[in-house]
Amino acid sequence: MCGIGKGVDADGRAFSEATIKAYLTEIRNRLDRAAGIGRAADACAGAGFHEKGLEVALDIEQLLYEATTLLNAASLINRITPTKLKRAALLGPTEKQGIAPARLQIESAVCRR
């Protein structure tokens, strides 16, 4: 937690939001392709070609892996990018008085080591 998200300005948040949006679009694209493959596999199985249906369905695996990886990346970016809401939720009455809360004092001490 030392220094993570510190110094991220509006441009950094805008970049994070654009990146997350692009990742979500790519997730949708991969899931759409996986759904199409699933329909093809189902049609094969419905026509009596169960083995071919399974072979086709296995092509979904890579797309799902990529979608999961993109989702994990978007989630990580979201967690490390501070927002006004996140900052407001962390603010307590001591910050308004200029006194760092105990959790920040402890974190600062740990970060200096």
Image (spheres, rainbow, N blue to C red):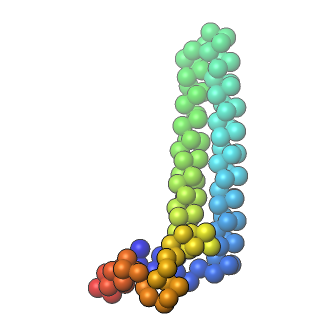
Residue at the (56%, 41%) spot, across then down: 64
Q: Is residue 43 visible?
A: yes
Residue 79, compared with residue 57, is above or below; it is below
Residue at the (36%, 83%) spot, across then down: 105
Residue 45, compared with residue 61, is above or below; it is above
Report the residue that reaches farthest toward the top. Answer: 48
Res. 23 image quadrant: bottom right
| Left or right of residue 98: residue 26 | right
Report the residue that reaches farthest toward the bottom. Answer: 98
Give x and y (percent) for residue 107. 36, 79
Number of marks in picture: 0
Res. 32 image quadrant: top right
Give x and y (percent) for residue 49. 61, 13
Residue at the (49%, 79%) spot, across then down: 93
Residue 53, compared with residue 1, is above or below; it is above
Which quadrant is home to the N terminus? bottom left
| Left or right of residue 99: residue 72 | right
Give x and y (percent) for residue 4. 47, 76
| Left or right of residue 13: residue 96 | left
Q: Is residue 111 visible?
A: no
Which quadrant is home to the C terminus? bottom left
Residue at the (56%, 74%) spot, across then down: 87
Residue 61, compared with residue 105, is above or below; it is above
Give x and y (percent) for residue 79. 53, 64
Front residue (pair 83, 64):
83
